[in-house]
Every structure is written in C-alpha cells, then in structure tokens.
Amino acid sequence: MQLDRGLTGLTLAMVVVVASANYLVQYPVNDWLTWGALTYPVSYFITDLTNRFYGKALARRVVLIGFVLAVLASIWLASPRIALASGSAFLMSQLMDVAIFDRLRSRPWWQPPLVSSTVGSLVDTVLFFALAFYGTGVPWVTLAIGDYAVKVLVALLLLAPWWLAARRG
C-alpha cells in the first residue's frame, strides 16, 4: 500500500510539473528564457527520487505513465505541436536520465542526480526547442541556451533537497 501511494504521488507530481512547464514554455521571460525552464527541471528530481527509492524499472514506469498523462494534459494546455515536441523530448531524455542514474548509483551521492539531470536536460532542451519552435520565428536557439542554463542551475539547487532525501532512504 505504501509503495503504491509513493509511486502514485511521484507520478502525479510528474504530470503536474511537465504539464505546467508545457504551458509556461509558451511565455518567454525574455529572448533567453521561458517560464517553463523554472518548473521542468523538477521532473528530473522526481525521476531520480523514484529511481533511488524504487529502482530503475519503477522509475521507467513513472516516466511512461507521466509521459502519457502529461502529453494529454499538454494538448489541452498548450498547442499540439508543443505537446508532441514535449512528449518526444520528455520520453527520450527521461529514459536516458533513468539509465545514467542507474549506472552511477554507486558513486558519491551527488553524482547520479547531477550528471543524469544535466545530460537529460541537454537532450530534452535540444529536441524540444527544435521540434516546438523551428521555423516559427521564435528565437528558439537563444531560448534553448537560456533554458538549459537555468535547468543546470536548478539541478544544482536541487542537490540540497536530494541530499536530505538520500540520507533518509
């Protein structure tokens, strides 16, 4: 019962984070940043927590369920192009995050979440911005650079709650 409740909470958190990021990415802060960059990096934190406490197989399950539900929510909250770009980038980058985290599991506490999140974020950023905004007149290259910088910064900031969570488990 506790396992199901924890996985359900992590899956719902994933859907909320991804759907809100897909909505917020439509609103640039400036030519270098969208509001979505502030929420989306939390998805890697959720994936890494799932991987740490429940293992690789259940982390993949959270990613796949989160993918389906977030794409459906995103079609309603954002344009179909953004929803499909997000879904493609999300699935590729999150599954990569799960694999990298699992390979680094025995390393010092900070390496698995930081390395897997920064690599996953890079893949997500390139795929998402190219698919969502290429040919639209949106300055997607500068937005991608700015968003990636923020994603790395957030990954670094999330090391503090990661350390606390990892100590408990």
Image: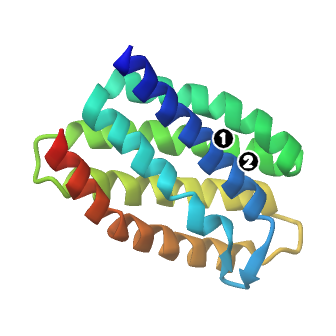
Name which residue lies at 21% across and 57% down: 163
Label 1 CA crowd tier, 10 Å (few <14, some 14–19, many 20+): some
Look at label 2 and name its amino acid: Ala
- Furthest toward the bottom, the residue is 30
Name which residue lies at 50% across and 45% down: 93
Name which residue lies at 70% across and 47% down: 19
Look at label 1 and name its amino acid: Ser
Q: Could you say which quadrant of the image residue 111 lies in?
A: bottom left
- Say the numbered circle drawn on residue 85: 2
- Whole-Å distance between the Cαs marked 2 and 1? 5 Å
- Percent from the top left, x then y, of residue 64? 56, 27
Pointers 2 and 1 in contact (CB under 8 A)?
yes
Front residue of this view, candidates 163 and 44: 163
- Say the numbered circle drawn on residue 58: none
Lateral position of residue 72 relative to residue 34, left or right: right
Quarter of the image with the N terminus is: top left
- Percent from the top left, x then y, of residue 97? 40, 44
Residue 93 vertical placement versus 67 (above, below) = below
Please tell me whether mark 2 sits on a helix, a strand or a loop.
Answer: helix
Residue 149 vertical placement versus 78 (above, below) = below
Q: Which residue is mark 1?
A: 88
Quarter of the image with the C terminus is: top left
Lateral position of residue 94 relative to residue 157, left or right: right
Front residue of this view, candidates 121 and 66: 66
Name which residue lies at 36% across and 35% down: 50
Q: Could you say which quadrant of the image residue 126 lies in?
A: bottom right
Residue 17 vertical placement versus 122 (above, below) = above
Please tell me whether mark 1 sits on a helix, a strand or a loop.
Answer: helix
Number of numbered discs present? 2
- Percent from the top left, x then y, of residue 100? 31, 42
